[in-house]
């Protein structure tokens, strides 16, 4: 059942009267009451990372933009972000968009996201505007990021997205399941999965069972056409272009990926001539810097709805290109936001738009009963394990940020302690929920940081030179001048090792002054005992990292970090 505006506001008012909403929200029923505009509404979610329940999620306090992107969105945090987008401090939006005073504000405003609350809001946004004029688009990283998603191989999220009513999606972490599992899930998915930039390798195509197009070698449908109350909308899919580099290629041996810019331009031209749509939309998992560059070079796309970098950007960025202008947006992560983009179409041409990035404050939106029932059913077989208490957090534990997070430090400390290692390495993943001070850390929290299909730990010797090469390589990926060469993720997290980083230097010159926690300088030829997890190359032999972290937390009982291995940043304002 869709909810029109009157029904939705009545629901919020009833919840407030019944005491289901805290006093903070007693007069906030108009927060989600968006005025209708135009002919077509696009709803955009991305990077939900399998978070079915409401969560806490702290935004980064460091998100550096280098060279041409210095001081520009999406590389703005805290007060600079609020000032740039004219967001008032100490408000709902300010808390949703920034890390400022996070722990205290989280106690006031509560958790965010949750598919049951998202479902209620989606029903309202569709029902109040017109179901026949609305599309719900998912930018990917949906099937991975929780214990239940891992244990069901993403099937729990397919069911939830079907109930939510996702019309079109693309992917990234979806491809870290086995190829046969990807196709099984897509067979069950009721929407369209689009990805113009994923091809079947020529050597695999001869006897390949699943090509969408045997002539073009597309593994999936490159685009889909949706007619919304007489308005034709083309939605092209752009899956994460560096999946076989950022994630193990062994899971996807038959496919190639890439940005494929010339091919995208050719496809846009073909769609315009053949389909004559009023709107061309790219649902992208490139990352926002890549999308901004792509928008400046490929003409004919009206809007890029982006993902991958988890940027909550409250206004679209207008990018000029050879034949016009493209809007570029990004809708955050973890089910925390939904982007609402209304277009006015006249005589088959775009004449105006309005955008709102809506945070999902779960205390403000009653849960949808049907979605709640599905979530409860999904979690029931795993509930005892998920709710197992491990330790107590004495400080805020978070992941998001260019260089390190406090929960990342806990993982690194666990790897060192359980393997008697001098140094530990942990990948710079952007997914992972937040734990407030004095909150019990459960197994579910650990899985929120670690649940993936290549979690095996390792212990090996590395030379100082090898360690520097690893840091230089990841740093170049993060801070390369060319966005097309930024291949995903944040900086590798470290335990037991400090260093100095100059993001503006060239490859091989960004990392210096590497020292152990005791101040001892790292020597290039000396060997060090290093523990880590999540190898992209050959599979490691160690236990899953969540077992390592859970055992460590049970041992220490309370988490209070005495050392935070964050590098010293020079050459740029961090």
Image (cartoon, rainbow, N blue to C red):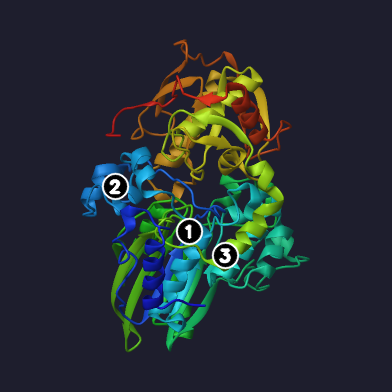
From this view, report whether residue 89 is shown above or below residue 254.
above
Q: Say which residue label 3 marks.
A: 371
From this view, report whether residue 551 is shown above or below residue 139.
above
Q: Residues within 10 Å of mark 1 (few under 14, many from 20)?
A: many
* Residue 185 screen position, x and y as percent: 68, 63
Q: Who comes first in sequence, dot 2 or dot 1?
A: 1
Q: Which of the two residues, 307 or 275, is positioned nearer the viewer here?
A: 307
Disc nearest the viewer among 1 and 3: 3
Q: Who comes first in sequence, dot 1 or dot 3?
A: 1
Q: Which of the two residues, 54 or 453, is positioned nearer the viewer here?
A: 54
Q: Say which residue label 1 marks.
A: 46
* Residue 77 screen position, x and y as percent: 31, 44
Q: Quadrant of residue 32?
A: bottom left
Residue placed farthest to the front in the image?
18
Disc nearest the viewer among 2 and 1: 1
Element under label 3? helix
Disc nearest the viewer among 2 and 3: 3
Q: Residue at x 29, y 74 (%)?
A: 35
Q: Quadrant of residue 340?
A: bottom left
Element under label 1? loop
């Amino acid at each position: 059942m869709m909810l029109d505006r009157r029904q939705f506001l009545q629901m919020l008012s009833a919840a407030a009267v019944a005491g289901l909403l805290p006093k903070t929200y007693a007069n906030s029923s108009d927060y989600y009451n968006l005025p209708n505009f135009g002919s077509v509404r696009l709803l955009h979610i991305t990077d939900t990372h399998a978070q079915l329940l409401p969560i806490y999620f702290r935004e980064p306090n460091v998100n550096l933009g280098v060279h041409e992107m210095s001081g520009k969105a999406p590389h703005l945090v805290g007060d600079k972000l609020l000032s740039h987008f004219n967001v008032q401090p100490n408000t709902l939006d300010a808390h949703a968009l920034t890390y400022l005073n996070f722990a205290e504000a989280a106690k006031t405003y509560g958790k965010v996201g949750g598919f049951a609350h998202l479902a209620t809001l989606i029903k309202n946004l569709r029902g109040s505007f017109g179901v026949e004029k609305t599309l719900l688009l998912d930018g990917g990283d949906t099937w991975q990021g929780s214990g239940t998603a891992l244990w069901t191989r993403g099937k729990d999220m397919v069911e939830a997205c079907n109930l939510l009513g996702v019309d079109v999606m693309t992917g990234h972490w979806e491809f870290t399941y086995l190829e046969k599992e990807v196709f099984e899930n897509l067979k069950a998915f009721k929407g369209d999965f689009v990805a113009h930039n994923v091809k079947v390798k020529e050597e695999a195509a001869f006897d390949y069972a699943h090509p969408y197009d045997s002539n073009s070698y597309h593994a999936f449908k490159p685009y889909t056409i949706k007619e919304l109350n007489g308005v034709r909308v083309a939605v092209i899919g752009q899956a994460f272009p560096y999946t076989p580099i950022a994630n193990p290629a062994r899971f996807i041996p038959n496919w190639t990926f890439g940005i494929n810019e010339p091919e995208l331009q050719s496809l846009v031209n073909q769609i315009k001539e053949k389909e004559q749509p009023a709107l061309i939309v790219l649902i992208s998992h490139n990352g926002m810097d890549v999308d901004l560059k792509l928008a400046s070079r490929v003409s004919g796309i009206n809007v890029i709805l982006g993902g991958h970098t988890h940027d909550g950007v409250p206004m679209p960025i207008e990018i000029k290109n050879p034949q016009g202008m493209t809007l570029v947006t990004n809708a955050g992560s973890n089910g925390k936001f939904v982007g609402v983009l209304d277009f006015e179409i006249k005589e088959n041409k775009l004449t105006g738009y309005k955008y709102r990035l809506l945070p999902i404050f779960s205390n403000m939106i009653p849960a949808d009963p049907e979605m709640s029932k599905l979530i409860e059913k999904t979690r029931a077989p795993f509930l005892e394990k998920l709710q197992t208490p491990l330790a107590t957090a004495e400080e805020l534990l978070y992941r998001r940020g260019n260089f390190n997070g406090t929960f990342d430090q806990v993982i690194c400390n666990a790897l060192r302690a359980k393997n008697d290692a001098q140094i530990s390495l942990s990948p710079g993943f952007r997914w992972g929920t937040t734990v407030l001070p004095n909150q019990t850390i459960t197994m579910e929290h650990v899985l929120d940081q670690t649940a993936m299909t290549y979690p095996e730990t390792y212990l090996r010797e590395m030379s100082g030179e090898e360690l520097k090469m690893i840091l230089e390589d990841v740093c170049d990926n993060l801070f390369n001048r060319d966005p097309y060469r930024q291949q995903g993720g944040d900086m590798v997290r470290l335990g037991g090792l400090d260093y100095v980083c100059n993001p503006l230097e060239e490859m091989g010159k960004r990392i210096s002054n590497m020292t152990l926690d005791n101040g001892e300088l790292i020597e290039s030829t000396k060997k060090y005992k290093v523990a880590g997890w999540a190898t992209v190359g050959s599979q490691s032999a160690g236990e899953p990292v969540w077992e390592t972290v859970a055992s460590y937390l049970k041992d220490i009982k309370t988490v209070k970090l005495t050392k935070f291995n964050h590098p010293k940043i020079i050459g740029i304002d961090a």
